[in-house]
Image (cartoon, rainbow, N blue to C red):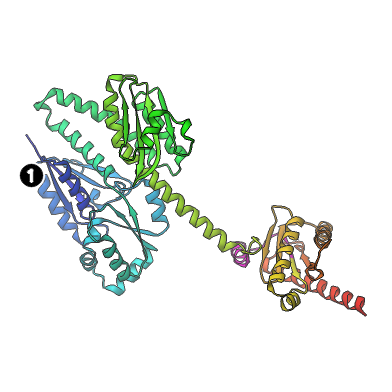
Amino acid sequence: MREKLTIFVCENFYPDYRKIIEEEDYKDVVLVSFPCLCTDRKRKEEVETLLKNIIESENPALAFCGEHCDLTKLLPEATGVDFWKSEHCFSHLANESFLTYIIEKGGYLVGSGWLETWQEQLEKQGFDQETARRFYSEVANELVFFDTGIVSDSRKKLRELSNYLDLPFKIIGSDLKMTKRMIRCAVNEWRQRYLNERSKKALEESRIQTAEYAAIFDVLAKIVAYTNKRDTVGGIKNLFLMVFGAEDFKYWTGDLDKAEYPEAVLSLMENPAKSYSYQKEADGFCIKIERSDKLYGVIEVGGFLFPENTEKYLNFAIEIAMILGLVFNNIEQYEKITRSEENLSYLSFHDPMTELYNRTFINDYFEKNSGLIERTVFMFDIDRLKYVNDTFGHADGDKLIKSAAKVLERSFREESILARIGGDEFMAIIPETDKILADRILERLREEVENNNRDLAESHLALSLSAGFALPQGAPETLEALMQRADEEMYRDKTERRKKFAESKA
């Protein structure tokens, strides 16, 4: 009888798996690390030797790896070594969507084993500091480390690596609950396959448990892929109703008045030391979803199809709740990063004073439309802005700029592109139109200027805009050519307005 299971895992994650094997006291499991081929393909022969030894031992073996890992290419199918594949190497620490997002944004994921021996790892790859910096700056924008608490002085070591590679770093708190569940499921499955003669009853129970695990993991796999709380709560509800056969499910957030909560839920929320409560008479329970002392909500479940299994379901739920806490935590971080990037994107393309588009947006628009286009372009200039700035101060000058922006917004439709491209310069890009409609737009603009100036207490804040437009001349033109012609028309308008102003003063 083969009484040992060999678990084969990448050296980058060996410390994570070793901790779980020790904590769970799996005496029938042998943990073996293999060299990381992602960073050093020269060690292929070393990996092949390890695999050969495992195969010759005739002990059952299981390899945890990403689906694109080179390890999967080194073994023929009929070797007796099974694979537990995931989309990413780090899938035991975070959901796939979050990992994909980090990687797409240029994050370089660092494993516990790699961080502990990073100098040695870079040496094996043949890097000195100069070549390492050049290589990693081309493949990544920052280092990302999921801190499971295994690496001592992880922040110090990450800072040393960051300084060596001249890359910023980010630490994301994590734990090993998902990894523990994966290993436990794998070990249970192996025990079914190789230890069935020891106890048929134990085998049957193990089969049932594995089936339950499989159903649970099928739903959990979908839950951890969600990137918003609403879908996640829906997935949790499906887990308890469909897998556990509950009839009643309620997810309570912490933003209601106390009077609105059932007594069992409120009692649990107000007691930091308790993570669940079991209502035996009601065949139900309440369980917290929390992470790092932050409460995300309380699940209230009852009315099970097989009430005799309620206590067993509770034990399942306690472990699942730990994973769900991590899911909610990942969603929060994902939302923070997304909001931050949306804000940065908005700021990079908008003028902070007027909230219109800025010159950067127009340059980007010009690059994307560097070919010929059929659009009508308007150019505008605030008259006497320098005089107001020099005479009354920039605060009053800013008032004129904001007035101009509001007048333009009222004069053009929402689909128009409005931008402040300089201190006193604005422009608009609209779908192709004819001269009659363009003149009407300018007429509407003059009316809006008059409305703005009506009843002003300070005459120097009266707005005056010079304007000009350019229509496509029978064929598409470049945006640059249209802007130049519109600019010329705008300066003709400005010259005429100055002439009329001088004549009125004569």
Q: In screen coordinates, is 317 left or right of 490? A: left
Mark 1 Cα within 10 Å, few/some/many (few <14, many 20+)? Answer: few
Q: Residue at x 64, y 64 (%)?
A: 353
Is residue 177 visible in this depiction of the protein?
Answer: yes
Q: Does 387 sit left or right of 342 as displayed?
A: right
| Quadrant of the rendered image containing residue 47 | bottom left
Front position in the image: 426 or 432: 426
The image shows residue 54 at horizontal and vertical percentages of 11, 47
Residue at the (15%, 46%) spot, across then down:
22
Residue at the extreme left of the image, as rendered: 1
**Image quadrant in which the N terminus is located:** top left
| Highlighted range, magenta | 358-378
Quarter of the image with the C terminus in it: bottom right
Question: Percent from the top left, x then y, of residue 100?
Answer: 39, 51
Image coordinates of residue 28 in percent, x first then y, are 11, 39
- In this view, 457 is above or below 243: below
Where is residue 3? Give x, y as percent. Answer: 8, 37
- Residue holding disc 1: 57
The stretch drawn in magenta includes residue 79: no
**The residue under label 1 is which amino acid type?**
Ser
Toward which corner of the image does residue 497 lie, by quadrant?
Answer: bottom right
As drawn, 468 above or below 183: below
The residue lying toward the viewer, choosing from 264 and 359, is 264
Residue most extreme to the bottom: 506
